[in-house]
Amino acid sequence: MKIRYPLAFEIFPKEIDAGEKWLTLRIKNIGKSKLLNLDVQLNSLDSYYLKGINDSEFIYELEPDEETKIPFKVKATATSSVYVSVESMTEDGKPLFVESPSVTIRIGYVPAEIRTMFVLTRPYPVPEETIKCESTIIGLKRSNELNLEFWADTPSEKFELLASMKTKQFDAGEIGKYSAEITPEDEGVYEIHAYLYDGDKRVDHKTDTIFVKK
């Protein structure tokens, strides 16, 4: 289970078919205080591809070491990540807000995934400094060549394509590394996106963020 004290979380199954399906959340109180009036929400990091139909449930109380399971109905079309947020109160009346680590839910046939996506730079690069972005892809099943795209969401609100490339054919467990470069022109926050496609179907998406300043 993934832990964000005082709660532990598990979401399953990790693979579902496209369409309206059910995910189950297992949630456990690993703290020392009873939790009251828990408003539990399932959140998607990309609601275009996966969104909750009943995305909020209520738990009256959760004793220390007690766990419960909550079903959430979702509508999914492509692999996405979800996380859980919980608003509640402790036994002594203190408000508590907890967000779980994210979990990737694979939708349908997924031949590979982006294992990591990093911007390789010092903490605060300056404008006009060329920066390398690198994605590591791991094969989950035998696949044909896949399509990988790097994009940048810039401070000027432009969404710019940095690179588009074909990957190699993957076997299960095989790893490949791919990179692109960006030369920021302005100060501010840049969010770098890596998208992996099998034909026209998006199979994964990862991001990293850099802050550029003089």
Image (cartoon, rainbow, N blue to C red):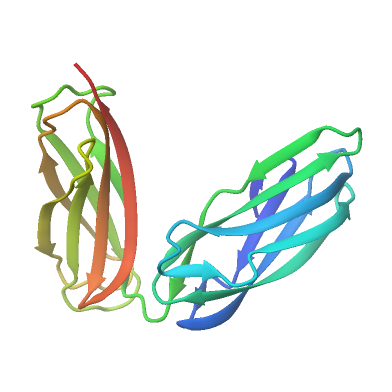
Q: Nearer the viewer, residue 147 or 144?
A: 147
Question: Is residue 5 visible in this depiction of the protein?
Answer: no
Residue 130, relative to residue 112: is it above or below? above
Left or right, 95 with respect to 162, comes to: right
Question: Is residue 73 visible in this depiction of the protein?
Answer: yes
Residue 179, relative to residue 56: is it above or below? above
Question: Percent x, y for residue 97?
Answer: 69, 40
Q: Nearer the viewer, residue 48 or 90?
A: 48
Quadrant in which residue 90 is drawn: top right
Question: Percent x, y for residue 101?
Answer: 56, 48
Q: Farthest residue toward the front?
A: 157
Residue at position x 10%, y 34% from top? 183
Question: Percent x, y for residue 187?
Answer: 21, 25
Residue at position x 22%, y 77% from top? 200
Residue at position x 79%, y 59% from top? 58
Left or right, 213 with respect to 55, comes to: left
Query: What is the quadrant of the N terminus in the image?
Result: bottom right
Residue 46, relative to residue 30: is it above or below? below
Residue at position x 88%, y 56% from top? 60
Question: Percent x, y for residue 63?
Answer: 90, 50
Quadrant in which residue 190 is drawn: top left
Quadrant in which residue 52 is drawn: bottom right
Left or right, 183 with respect to 37, comes to: left
